[in-house]
Amino acid sequence: MTTTTQTQQALHSQAMRQAAPEADALRMGVGWDKRDLAKPWVLVETAGGDSHPCAVHLHEVARHVRDGVIGCGGAVGRYDCTDMCDGVAQGTGAMDLSLPSRELLRMAVELHATSGHFDGMVLLAGGDKSLPAHLLAAAQLNLPTVLVPGGVGDVGPGGMTLEQIGASHAALRRGEMDTETFEASCQGACASAGTCAFFGTAATMQLLVEGLGMALPFSALRPVHLNHHARGARQAGEQLMQLIKTNLRPKDILTQAALHNALVLHAATGGSTNALIHLAALARVLGLPWDLQQVTAINNQVPWILNVRPSGQYANHHVWYAGGVPRLLYELRPFLKLEALTVTGQTVGQNLQDLQTQTMEAGGAGGTDGGLAYFERHGAYLQNLGLTVRDVIKPIEAPLSGQGALTLLFGNLAQGGAVVKRSAVDAAMHRFTGRAKVFFNQQAATEAVFAGKIEPGDCVVLAGQGPKANGMPEQFYLTEAIASNPKLAASVALVTDGRFSGATRGPCVGHVSPEWAQGGAIGLVEEGDLIAIDLDANQLNLVGLAGQPADEETIVQALAKRRATTAPYTPDLKPGLLGMYQRLATDAMQGGGIDG
């Protein structure tokens, strides 16, 4: 950790004032006064806007952050760059821009922080790409930073959450639901501002930014309607001022130990596969090793303990009521690097010890539960719902599953790896061999499902969906068309070099590397080939040709012949952001970022 404090050295903002004398006049032009100019300059950046419920409330949350900064002697510059909504773009060509938008948002923070000569940042986001974008920006810029997750929204009538709309629409297409019922579902699925109430990518990233140590304890998945949300935002502003004073920076926090803890938390919670892309990108920005074998090892060792949708039973707000990330970390202590620093200025272990101290002081008689009573009192929120903490967060001795959320697959179709959300796959599909049905766009594959052209025992192969091909869009409507069909849900697999929504369920293998646009073998699969998926052995292989099993040598020869006679895949390079991303993006297993 850096030991020189900002009080012992000139603030960056003050040095820049000397180099750019017009800065004083321009700052006062937006409402600062002369006294503000000599204070630490703090960027409060939000992804706020009308783009989706994750973003619509962030301007109000930022007001509380501002109060915290100003109350501790800082001067605030408010900036905004909202994100796109993956749900609005889902199933359309606009989805190609989703992963590239992460890079755009990261660059926006870089632009604002660097050009504004700020001494520190508080970054507020709640969406799938805005949260990882802000995390990457913090790592890149290495200014004292606190991240503020945007919190979670309420469930709709009957516990409705947004991911159920995909299943409802599929039922509508199959004639199993009427239009009036479907429209009523849409009206209630997003009941308030905040991140979607199911444990998708946005919710996963909220947990991970806190687990990495970049957000204050209890800030992830906080219900937006609670007054805790305003208080927590103000505390984030106050803590940022402390970080500027002590010069504690993201690279002091985002260490190999922090990445380890994030992977443990992800494994234990059944998190979105998209998080693997974002954590790989984070490691790349930090210059830290990223070992796919370590990812597999952690997921094989760490049990799955969080009972939330879509893999589990409950909605996101239940997680915070059960004790949030601190309770999860408490349960996972044997697997964690407790020495990892956090934005509190203390380690993960010290933060948990503080909760034990608060228990002893607040509880009077203390107790012998090692701090558990604090979480039980916090978990009293669940009594309002007729639940207990153990309904939502299981002990590691009695988990939902003895293994974690993800598993990585390798083989002749995925020499660089592929990922599957094991926690969302029926045990009967952990070992599966299927006939290839080959497609090159999601719409054609989805229509084939609804037309009855996909049958039990098929393996849908969707190639040309990686970062360099078309920006790596999600394939949610295709996966939901399969998973919501009782005839196909436990008998059909999907393999793609694209990615999936955090709401995806079923045997869906994604991020196949190398992608077809980089010469990957997934683009050489032909109709009727046999594909074997083995989650227990971590294998994804072509094992047969034209419906007949074949030995390894025959497969190698066939792939070589196909490669020699198949024209290399040439992406349709688009103008603007997508085209820039197609040209510069790294492989998905390396984070899918722009390095140029």
Image (cartoon, helix red, strand yellow):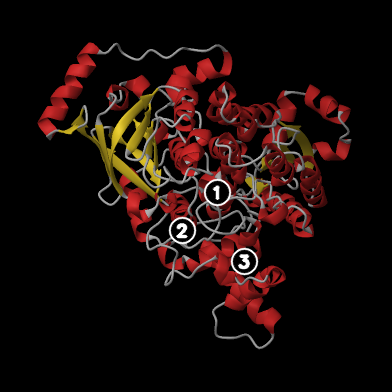
**Residue type beneath disc 2:** Ala
Comparing 246 with 176, the one in front is 176
Is the residue marked by circle 3 packed among few (<14), some (14-19), or many (20+) residues within 10 Å?
many
Is the residue marked by circle 1 packed among few (<14), some (14-19), or many (20+) residues within 10 Å?
many
Q: Is residue 515 left or right of residue 224?
A: left
Q: Is residue 479 left or right of residue 114?
A: left
For label 1, the residue is 204
Residue 285 higher or lower than 465, as above or below:
below
N-terminal-most mark, 1 or 3: 1
**Tag of residue 322:** 3
Q: Secondary structure at mark 3?
A: loop
Q: Quadrant of residue 326?
A: bottom right
Q: CA distance from mark 2 to mark 1?
A: 11 Å
Comparing 3 with 419, the one in front is 419
Q: Give percent across and percent down for residue 157.
A: 72, 53
Q: Secondary structure at mark 1?
A: helix
Q: CA distance from mark 1 to mark 3?
A: 16 Å
N-terminal-most mark, 2 or 1: 1
Picture residue at 88% right of the left edge, 33% below the top:
31
For label 2, the residue is 268
Circle count:
3
Whether label 1 touches label 3, CB < 8 Å = no
**Residue type beneath disc 3:** Ala
Q: Give percent across and percent down for residue 391.
A: 56, 68
**Residue type beneath disc 1:** Thr
Q: Give percent across and percent down for residue 592.
A: 45, 30
